[in-house]
Amino acid sequence: MATTADIVCVGSGHNGLVAAAYLAVAGKKVLVLERNEWFGGGVVTRELTVPGFRHDQHSMAHIFIQANPLLANDDLKLKERYGLRYLFPEVPMMSVFEDGKTLSLYRDSQRTYAEIKKFSARDAEAYREISEQARAWLPMFTSSLYSPPIPLGAQFALLDQSREGRDLFRVMSMSSHDLLCERFENDRVRMHFARIAGENLVAPDEKGTGIGTFVFLGFLEAYGFGVPVGGSGSLTNALIACIKDHGGQVLSKATVERIKVAKGRATGVVTKDGQTYDARDAVIGAIHPHLLGDMVEGIDPIVRKTAEATQFSEAACVTVHAALNAPLRFKAGDHVKAVMIELLPNEYEQLRRSFDDLRYGNLAQYPLLGIGSLTLFDPSRVPAGKAIAHIWDYAPYKRRDGFSWDHKKGEFAQRMLTHAARFIDNLGPDDIVAYHCDSPVDMERTSPSFMHGDLHGIATTVYQSGAHRPTPDLGQFTVPGIDRFYLVGPFQYPGGGVFGAGRATAMRMFEDLKLDFEKQGRKK
Ligand SMILES: Cc1cc2nc3c(=O)[nH]c(=O)nc-3n(C[C@H](O)[C@H](O)[C@H](O)COP(=O)(O)OP(=O)(O)OC[C@H]3O[C@@H](n4cnc5c(N)ncnc54)[C@H](O)[C@@H]3O)c2cc1C
């Protein structure tokens, strides 16, 4: 086994793999070390319940990566050569209200217009305006998401130079709730879009979330929600195949404890079992800001302190993965078919109050359940006629009742299933072959990126966004004072989600290693 490589990458999450793959294709000898027995971090498909049922343990919809040149140009030939394929269902997202009403967001904005018109003709017009604005802003969003961020001061100065920029700044500063109340009159329509913002683990009342509606809608209508054939892990598999094809290695059960630094330059890593792996050129690390100080030798104490002060989202995530005897039958009707299905109360205020409950460390009075049953689109993941469901809810990481999540997660999973059964006819004990639940604590056990059960690693607040994510020191994927050490992770720019953001880290590395990013690591 090689103990020296050009590039050593700590962690096989998709972002580390993306960065490593660009470098491997550019001719660097790459070694990826993963602490788990499996690869992919949050982009993984596993038989979590019974053999033959393949569940996406974390991410299931690949949304923001679709505009990344990694896939849009097939830079690394993941589609052409390494078997990555996506389905794009016509309804990415649907709200199902408790009284049986539904509201679908289609890729086709005309059809969404007609859906919203069922609730309010005025809101349908307002939606049209938002959709058009989102389409107009989309090229600006996509041009900035997959390369290193511009400094925050420069970004704000740029926005302040035009009316359009100032409009955008206003929306960026508002809460989703403020924006939705300004634009829509109907509470169901408001709630539908507020829940979309909530998928970022933020309450609709959180300031600085208004822009999410435009980003989400712009992507959803232009690209759809990508459902990887075979499961989320197909992306990980394609990236690993690419790395190996270019002479790289990817090892499991290798926990990195320390980044070696000599004369202010990262020179390799040391694993838990005492093995040293040297890096001739650079080290890439999926290392949470709260862990950097303990793992990186000689880190500046102020950089460390600021990194450890990064804050988590108020909501942590709990998931239930169920193996089912048959596809789900929704009480609202057979038309309920979308990548993400949100189970919502009849009153918008109830949704807002549930997010408030989380803020005070309580369980949400009304569960905030979302469901994906991707066997609706890709039956290859289960035995013939069977199905799977991925159900998620939000909860505080630290329970107010003092019980541990290990003690209480079974009860919480039952609460989730019972609530979902109010919307679904066949989700009783006889319908479920087996299920697996990940509490916020399990979530952080699967990857330190999901510390505190925060599926974005740290909160997506204004002060932890853009070039200041996770901190102003670390916002350019580098650590001041430590050369040739580069960061990846959901806590880095642009944030949590399957973005393929490792591309931006790779760009930074290509520059330092005097490689031409435009020429190498691209589809020929
Ligand atoms: C429940 C859940 C549902 C989600 N759903 C979606 C979704 O539908 N769509 C979407 O876009 N996003 C979703 N996300 C978010 C998305 O999964 C993550 O943002 C993304 O996977 C982060 O990728 P990453 O490569 O940056 O980090 P990770 O996937 O966390 O990868 C980091 C890897 O590094 C390894 N590692 C860390 N430290 C060490 C060490 N010291 N030594 C060795 N290995 C180490 C970890 O084990 C892990 O494998 C979801 C997340 C969760 C938790």
Image (spheres, rainbow, N blue to C red):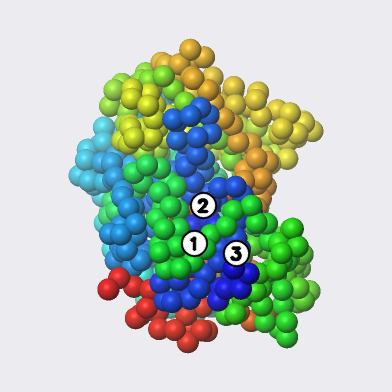
Residue 1, label in figure: 3
In the rendered image of this protein, does residue 349 appear above or below residue 39? above
Determine the residue positioned at 27% across, 73% down. 524
**Whole-percent x, y for residue 215 in the image:** 39, 56
Q: CA distance from mark 1 to mark 2?
A: 8 Å
Check the image and name the residue furthest to the left: 110
Tell me the amino acid under the disc marked 1.
Answer: Leu
Between 126 and 280, the one lying in front of the other is 280
Residue to which mark 1 is pinned: 17
Q: In this rendering, does residue 406 appear at all?
A: yes
Between 324 and 191, the one lying in front of the other is 324
Ligand 1 closer than 8 Å to label 2 CB? yes
Mark 2 falls on what kind of element? loop
Determine the residue positioned at 50% across, 73% down. 29
Label 2, residues with CA under 10 Å away: few <14, some 14-19, many ≥20: many
Image quadrant assignment for residue 518: bottom left
- Mark 3 or 1, which is nearer the eye? 3
Image quadrant assignment for residue 135: bottom left
Label 3, residues with CA under 10 Å away: few <14, some 14-19, many ≥20: few
Residue 40, label in figure: 2
Ligand 1 closer than 8 Å to label 1 CB? yes
Q: Is 89 situated left or right of 449 in this image?
A: left
In the rendered image of this protein, does residue 320 appear above or below residue 330? below
Nearest to N terminus: mark 3 or mark 1: 3
